[in-house]
Amino acid sequence: MLPYNIDHVAIAVRDLDAALADLKEQYGTEPLSREVIESQGVEEAMVPVGASYIQVLQPLGPETPVGRFVEKRGEGLHHIAFSVPDIEAAIEHLESTGVRLIDHEPRVGGGGNRIAFVHPSAFAGTLVELVELVEEPT
Amino acid sequence: MLPYNIDHVAIAVRDLDAALADLKEQYGTEPLSREVIESQGVEEAMVPVGASYIQVLQPLGPETPVGRFVEKRGEGLHHIAFSVPDIEAAIEHLESTGVRLIDHEPRVGGGGNRIAFVHPSAFAGTLVELVELVEEPT
């Protein structure tokens, strides 16, 4: 069950426009896409950096998971996402190890990809997302 | 000054052996290298995931930067590192934007690479490392 790659690293921010402007000024990067995902309570932008993305997340309100994260811990690194070839197989494997999962069934995330979150208790306090891409990497 | 890639995502842990065992069990990944870096107060392992690495950091003691991070915030995501073609040019560019840098001159990091840290105040509370690799990516 080796992941293909680090699909993205997510950073929670208070102001998506300001964060994207900072990234552009500092690193010359620009978002490839931007969308509101009501089911996750975020507006997110995907900023390509080499073979991966920086995912910049702005909560839609304080009572969302990312909103609570920002209130409690401030802006900053939020989660890491691994692209996997078969998300059901990855979930099944992780279940077999006894770690705690947030999603036992894939759901639809940004870009229409199939995603599932693994609880931070599984690996060193780190929220991990599994992503099965709609389009396989070339 | 576009970064080449996300060179690594660093995760601070209390127990490097346990964290590497968890990564292997959960994701089938194994470290490519492991070294003590006294100047940074860490033992670190580089675990390849696709085109990037997970860098697992164990502090050498509580009075190190990573030791203080773990005491204050617990284990978890610590910083993100961008590989850049020319680290002096990258530092000079960032200085020109007025953001706060931790290192104004490159120093030697893991694997003999040249590195510099940018203060988390520059971008959304996120500690960013610049890395000029000893060997250019192929």
Image: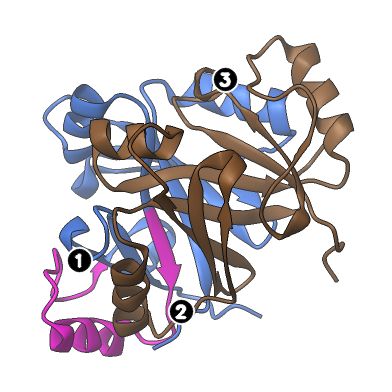
Chain colours: A blue, B brown
Residue A17 drawn above or below residue B20:
above
For the C terminus of chain A, which image quadrant?
bottom right
Residue A31: x and y in percent read 60, 41
- Chain letter of the residue beneath label 1 in the structure image: A
Work out whether residue A61 can be spotted.
Answer: no
Give the Cα distance between marks 3 and 1: 31 Å
The residue where tag 3 is placed is: B122
Amino acid under disc 1: Ala
Secondary structure type for disc 3: helix
Give the Cα distance between marks 3 and 2: 31 Å
Judged by depth in the image, the label closer to the viewer, 2 or 1, is 1
Residue drawn 18% across the image and 26% down it: A72
The residue where tag 2 is placed is: A3
Discs 3 and 1 share one subunit: no
Q: Would residue A76 appear left or right of A71 to someone viewing this image?
A: right
Where residue B77 is drawn, which disc sits there?
A: none
For the magenta stretch, what is the residue range? A80-107
- Chain letter of the residue beneath label 2 in the structure image: A
A82 part of magenta stretch: yes
Q: Would residue A136 appear left or right of B29 to someone viewing this image?
A: right
The residue where tag 1 is placed is: A122
B88 part of magenta stretch: no
Give the Cα distance between marks 2 and 1: 16 Å
Secondary structure type for disc 2: loop
Q: Which of the two residues, B88 or B138, is positioned nearer the viewer here? A: B88
Residue A4: x and y in percent read 52, 79
